[in-house]
Image (cartoon, rainbow, N blue to C red):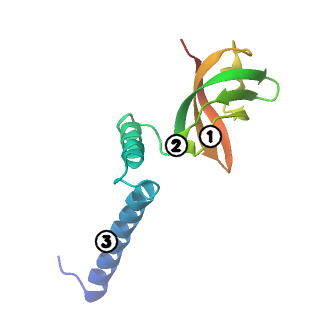
C-alpha cells in the first residue's frame, strides 16, 4: 500500500494525539498524590485497588449512618467519616439517589455502605446497602 506525504502526516498527527491524551489521563490520575510520602502511597494503593475492582473513575465508596430518608424527593441524609477519594472530611450531607427505589427499607439510624459519583457538580448515590 502506497502512502502519500499527507497520509503519513495525518497518521503521525493521529498517533501523537492519541499518545498525548493517554499521557494526560495518566498524569491526571496520579497528579493528586505524591508517591514519596506514606499518605501518597496509601492514596495510590487505594486508586489502584479501585481500578482493579473495576470501579468507574469518579465513584467513591464509604460507610455512613442514615440521619434522614426522604423517599418523595429521592434524597437521603448521611453522616459519614472522611472520604479521601472525594476530598471530603467527616460530615453530614444530603445526597440525591440515582433511583428512589434505593431508599426502600432504609430508615434513620441504619448503618450503610454507599457509592457516590459526582455528576454535574453534585454527588449522586449510585449504590447503597445496609452494613452488617
| The one of 26 and 40 positioned closer to us in this rendering | 40
Quarter location, residue 1: bottom left
| The one of 39 and 6 positioned closer to us in this rendering | 39
Extreme left residue here? Answer: 1
Give the class, few, some or many, for how many residues have Cα within 10 Å of label 2's Cα (few <14, many ≥20).
some
Check if mark 3's residue and mark 1's residue have beta carbons within 8 Å: no
Give the class, few, some or many, for how many residues have Cα within 10 Å of label 1's Cα (few <14, many ≥20).
few
Residue 94 falls left or right of residue 89: right
Extreme front residue here? Answer: 37
Residue appearing at x 36%, y 46% in the figure: 41
In front of the other: label 3 or label 1?
A: 1
| 90 versus 110 height, above or below | below
- Distance from disc 3 to disc 2, alpha carbons, whole Å, reads 32 Å
| 132 versus 5 height, above or below | above
Element at label 1: loop
Tell me which numbered mark, 3 or 1, is placed earlier along the sequence: 3
Marking on residue 39: none
In front of the other: label 3 or label 2?
A: 2
Judging by the rendered image, the residue that carries numbered circle 3 is 15
Judging by the rendered image, the residue that carries numbered circle 1 is 89
User: Looking at the picture, how far across and down is residue 125, in whole percent?
Assistant: 63, 33
- Distance from disc 3 to disc 1, alpha carbons, whole Å, reads 41 Å
Residue appearing at x 30%, y 83% in the figure: 9
User: Looking at the picture, how far across and down is residue 66, in whole percent?
Assistant: 70, 21
User: Looking at the picture, how far across and down is residue 98, in whole percent?
Assistant: 66, 33
Amino acid at each position: 500500500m502506497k502512502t502519500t506525504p499527507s497520509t503519513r502526516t495525518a497518521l503521525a498527527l493521529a498517533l501523537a494525539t492519541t499518545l498525548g491524551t493517554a499521557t494526560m489521563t495518566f498524569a491526571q490520575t496520579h497528579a493528586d498524590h505524591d508517591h514519596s510520602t506514606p499518605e501518597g502511597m496509601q492514596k495510590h494503593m487505594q486508586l489502584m485497588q479501585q481500578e482493579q475492582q473495576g470501579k468507574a473513575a469518579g465513584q467513591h465508596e464509604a460507610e455512613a449512618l442514615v440521619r434522614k430518608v426522604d423517599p418523595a424527593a429521592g434524597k437521603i441524609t448521611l453522616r459519614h467519616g472522611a472520604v479521601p477519594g472525594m476530598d471530603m472530611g467527616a460530615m453530614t450531607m444530603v445526597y440525591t439517589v440515582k433511583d428512589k427505589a434505593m431508599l426502600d427499607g432504609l430508615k434513620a439510624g441504619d448503618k450503610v455502605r454507599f457509592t457516590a459519583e459526582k455528576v454535574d457538580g453534585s454527588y449522586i448515590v449510585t449504590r447503597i446497602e445496609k452494613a452488617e
